[in-house]
Image (cartoon, helix red, strand yellow):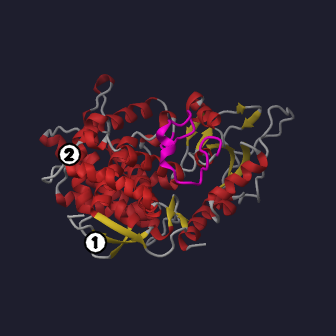
């Protein structure tokens, strides 16, 4: 077990023991009616449930073993929460789309404090839909078209120090790149002083986000809480400046500032700040993780890498004379695009979303009690041989035919699906273009290990030694 996994187990145990001393709201009263019944499964040890089994091994092993034993619907207990796990496309659609009103998104309070309670993904209903539309507007295809040269400039800047046989930590490099893209999308062009202050405090919050949630001075979580307050003040300063100068842009902050509801209702500074920080969090780790896996898969598949390289070299040739990538070119990378999709399927960054039943719900003769978690298992669906033959084989050509409905959900599904999915794919394609046309690389150390922190990631963030390709090649 690596140190990161151990740290997460400590966090999870803290959460578990907090449940021991909280009201037992999830315990159902005695009821002698027997239909519908709870799904089959094991709840594990009292309070602990099966948390240690899940977080001390490969989640694939845990969930696939359960599915093989109990079927596509089974119960368990994770983090002190009784859960119903659902491993079929139909069940995922039931929870996330057709009966989404019966299930609310749920997150640990420790994480909600760091992001902000007004962030859209802590809500449902009218407020959620209003904010979601504003986020979607700032990340529409029309908006992204104008961002291509700026994202490309950020990619080139991020790769400036690569080469000469230097070893990089791929995940950390991709994380820095995706953060800069997030800042661009949220604020547009920001003055250097504010950008550095934002960056410095954001990284403190990011470091404490998955740490032991205690308010003891000096701990990572306490430092993160203090940095979150400073972030709120920095964002308020940016908001004041925008309002005073009456600056109009197409970025997310402009969309949030310019929104007016009935009776000239506007969003408060706290609502704007919470949603900005929420978008930065949502846009960063997941996208950086996917890009890291893309680098790994291309490294492991030399023939595929040559095909991707040929595709991107042809685009590079079109742009002789240092012309920038165009929007149309990013939409015409069929081989690279399928590599991105297959990376999303194989890695399944989001193994499952957390939803909580707001009432007793019956599904296929089984009961999902009020207060229990209902968790569609994206990872199991993405790795099912019924929908994806030879699921453990990296095979981008499988996406030459569109997957069956509800079998491929890397960005979720329904009203809470990720509104930034097109941005994530765009920055990944731009990264691929410059990676394969300008560099060759080899993985350093273990080439098969995976760590979970909390997303599945190549071991140690995929250390890689990079060399710049000669211009003639």
> How many marks overall?
2
Residue 328 occupies quadrant: top left
Judging depth in this view, the residue of 65 and 204 nearest the camera is 65
Whole-percent x, y for residue 241 in the image: 17, 47
Dot 2 alpha-carbon crowd within 10 angstroms: few under 14, some 14 to 19, many 20 or more: few
Residue located at (42% from left, 65% from top): 207
Residue at 59% across, 70% down: 6
Counting from the top left corner in percent of width and height, residue 272 is at 32, 43
For residue 245, which quarter of the picture?
top left
The answer to whether residue 224 shows anywhere in this view is: no
The quarter of the rendered structure image containing the N terminus is: bottom right
Eyeballing the image, is 443 above or below 91? Answer: below
389 part of magenta stretch: yes
Q: Please report the bounds of the magenta region as a residue range.
A: 385-412
Q: Tell me if 137 is positioned left or right of 404 in this view.
A: left
Helix, strand or loop at mark 2:
helix
Seen at 57% across and 64% down, the residue is 11
* SS label for mark 1: loop
Kindly tell me whether residue 225 is visible in this rendering.
yes
Q: Nearer the viewer, residue 320 or 168?
A: 320
Residue where numbered disc 1 is placed: 163
User: Residue beneath label 2, please?
Assistant: 240
Dots 1 and 2: beta carbons under 8 Å? no
- How far across and down, in percent of the image, does residue 215 sit? 48, 65
Residue 121, numbered label: none
Q: Within the magenta stretch, is there residue 14?
A: no
Q: Residue at x 31, y 35 (%)?
A: 140
């Amino acid at each position: 077990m690596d140190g990161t996994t151990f740290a997460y187990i400590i966090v999870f145990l803290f959460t578990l023991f907090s449940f021991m001393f909280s009201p037992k709201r999830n315990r159902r009263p005695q009821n002698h009616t027997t239909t519908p019944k709870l799904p089959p499964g094991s709840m594990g040890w009292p309070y602990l449930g099966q948390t240690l089994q899940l977080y001390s091994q490969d989640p694939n092993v845990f969930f696939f073993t359960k599915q093989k034993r109990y079927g596509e619907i089974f119960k368990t207990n994770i983090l002190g929460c009784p859960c119903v796990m659902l491993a079929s496309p139909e069940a995922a659609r039931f929870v996330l789309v057709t009966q989404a009103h019966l299930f609310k998104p749920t997150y640990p309070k420790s994480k909600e404090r760091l992001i902000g309670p007004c962030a859209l993904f802590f809500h449902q209903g009218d407020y959620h839909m209003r904010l979601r539309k504003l986020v979607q507007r700032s990340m529409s295809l029309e908006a992204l078209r104008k961002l291509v040269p700026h994202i490309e400039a950020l990619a080139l800047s991020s790769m400036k120090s690569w080469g000469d046989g230097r070893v990089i930590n791929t995940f950390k490099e991709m994380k820095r790149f995706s953060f800069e893209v997030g800042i661009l999308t949220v604020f547009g062009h920001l003055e250097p002083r504010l950008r550095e202050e934002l960056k410095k405090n954001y990284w403190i919050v990011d470091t404490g986000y998955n740490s032991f949630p205690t308010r003891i001075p000096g701990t990572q979580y306490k430092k993160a809480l203090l940095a979150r307050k400073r972030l709120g003040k920095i964002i308020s300063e940016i908001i004041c400046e925008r309002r005073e100068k009456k600056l109009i842009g197409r970025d997310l902050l402009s969309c949030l500032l310019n929104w007016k509801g009935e009776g000239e209702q506007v969003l408060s500074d706290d609502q704007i700040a919470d949603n900005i920080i929420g978008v930065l969090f949502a846009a960063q780790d997941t996208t950086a993780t996917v890009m890291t896996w893309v680098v790994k898969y291309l490294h492991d598949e030399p023939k595929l890498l040559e095909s991707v390289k040929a595709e991107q070299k042809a685009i590079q040739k079109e742009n002789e004379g240092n012309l920038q990538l165009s929007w149309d070119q990013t939409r015409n990378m069929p081989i690279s695009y399928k590599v991105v999709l297959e990376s999303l399927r194989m890695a399944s960054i989001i193994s499952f979303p957390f939803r909580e039943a707001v009432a007793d719900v019956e599904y296929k003769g089984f009961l999902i009690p009020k207060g229990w978690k209902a968790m569609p298992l994206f990872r199991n669906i993405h790795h099912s041989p019924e929908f994806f033959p030879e699921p453990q084989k990296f095979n981008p050509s499988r996406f030459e035919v569109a997957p069956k409905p509800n079998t491929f959900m890397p960005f979720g599904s329904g009203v809470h699906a990720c509104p930034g999915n097109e941005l994530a794919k765009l920055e990944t394609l731009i990264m691929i273009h410059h990676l394969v046309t300008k560099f060759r690389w080899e993985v350093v150390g273990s080439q098969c290990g995976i760590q979970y922190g909390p997303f599945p990631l190549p071991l140690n963030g995929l250390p890689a030694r990079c060399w710049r390709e000669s211009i003639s090649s």
